[in-house]
Image (cartoon, rainbow, N blue to C red):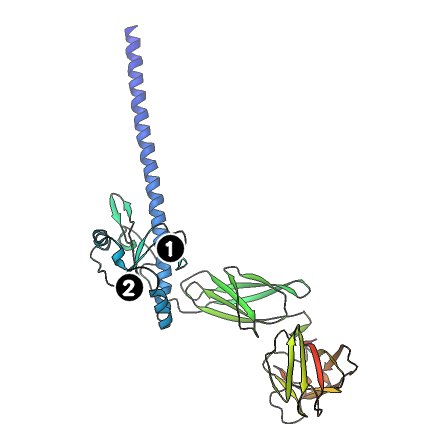
Amino acid sequence: MNNQKGITLITLVITIVILLILTGVIMNNGMESINTSKKTAFIAELEMIQAKVNIIYEKRKESFENIDYYNSIGQDISNVEQEHLNKVLGETGKAGFKYFNSSDLKRLDLDNINQEVLINYDTREIVSLTGCEINGIKYYKLKDIPNYIGHNVNYINSNTQAPEFTVSKTKLGENEYRIKIENIVYNSNVTGGTVKYKLYSDTNWNLNGENTNFIVTKPGLYDICFTDSAGNSSIVQKWIHEENEIFREDFYEYNYNEQGTTINSCSNSILDITAITTNPMIYMYNITEFNPMEYRYIEMKYRTINNSNVKFYLIENPIDETYAITNELEKDGEWHNVLIDLWSNENVKNKEEITGWRFDFAEVQNGVSMQIDYIRVVK
């Protein structure tokens, strides 16, 4: 009986010892896991800041405006308690450093950073004010962490080459296309970037962020810009038009030079013009690029009450009629479409590349007026 009690007591003691050992192992593993997570987050945040500072370092070289802008962000280092400042900097001098809290970092487009840092733009140095404890030692700089191999700390200025890319389009509906940036080649030591686009004739860009596709509803020549994360930009131009057309001007805006012509208005996709001399003309040069053997016609939708014909010179600065084509017009005040056959002039037909034209909308007629809805080049 007493022997059985002794065995039971021994068993209980052994069980308790085993449980204590297991608890210690679990707690130790749990603490190691927490410490590993903290270390990973600490390194990731400092790397994000380091990558941004590397970009700013290059941008500050571009202009005094950039220097003034980035110098306006951050606070004086005196906002940090002196003893702590000496601790985190160690042997590093204070000159050139500024103090950044989370609000300051957001102004650098660095969101969700959970620590305060010191930044020196001139040396690209980042020092954490929070630090991270690893094996009982607190570290404040990436380069001081044992066995750290970071590609952003030892920065090499190789981020100067612009990216390359192609552009594709998919028709979604009438005058509606999805544009997609594809086959991006990063020629710098970076990845990722932002997209913006605009009609060639516009001055304001449409910002598309990191999204590499967008939808347009106006046909025309588009400038599509991709800027990599180092600030290097490339622009690709893309014609957006129906499959059977290579160029289309809808006159949402007027962006040409003219002679002997009054531009009465250009709105709601209608160009309203009047001749004020006997030889009025509009210069529409460098607007497209096509071979007339493939794209044979210029189509124009118009209306007039006193204009008899139009003439297109399919060459810049014409001196004679070698590359001229004339077409008669209806002048009943109703909308009509005229189709100018480029093959009607053998010189034009055999011209391998046409990039624009001089548009004489009223030959030897002063005071005539007309309205134009669009001009396009089609097969």
10 Å crowding of disc 1: few (<14), some (14-19), many (20+) = some
The picture places residue 249, in percent across and down from the top left corner, at: 64, 75
Instruction: Choose between 172 and 5: the one closer to the eye.
Output: 172
112 lies left or right of 167? left
Q: Are marks 2 and 1 in contact (CB under 8 Å)?
A: no
Q: Residue 150 got which mark?
A: none
Residue 305, quarter of picture = bottom right
Instruction: Choose between 137 and 175: the one closer to the eye.
Output: 175
Secondary structure of the residue carrying tag 1 is: helix
Q: Residue 103 got which mark?
A: 1
- 155 lies above or below 282: above
The picture places residue 300, in percent across and down from the top left corner, at: 71, 78
Which residue lies most toward the right here? 332
The residue at 62%/91% (across/down) is 318
- The quarter of the rendered structure image containing the N terminus is top left
Q: Which residue is labeled 2 in the image?
A: 123
Q: Is residue 8 visible?
A: yes
Which residue lies most toward the top here? 1
10 Å crowding of disc 2: few (<14), some (14-19), many (20+) = few
Q: Which amino acid does the dot numbered 2 rest on?
A: Thr
The residue at 28%/64% (across/down) is 123
Secondary structure of the residue carrying tag 2 is: loop
The picture places residue 312, in percent across and down from the top left corner, at: 68, 86
Q: Which amino acid does the dot numbered 1 rest on?
A: Ser
2 or 1: mark nearer the eye? 1
- 314 lies above or below 202: below
375 lies left or right of 72? right
Q: Is residue 157 visible?
A: no
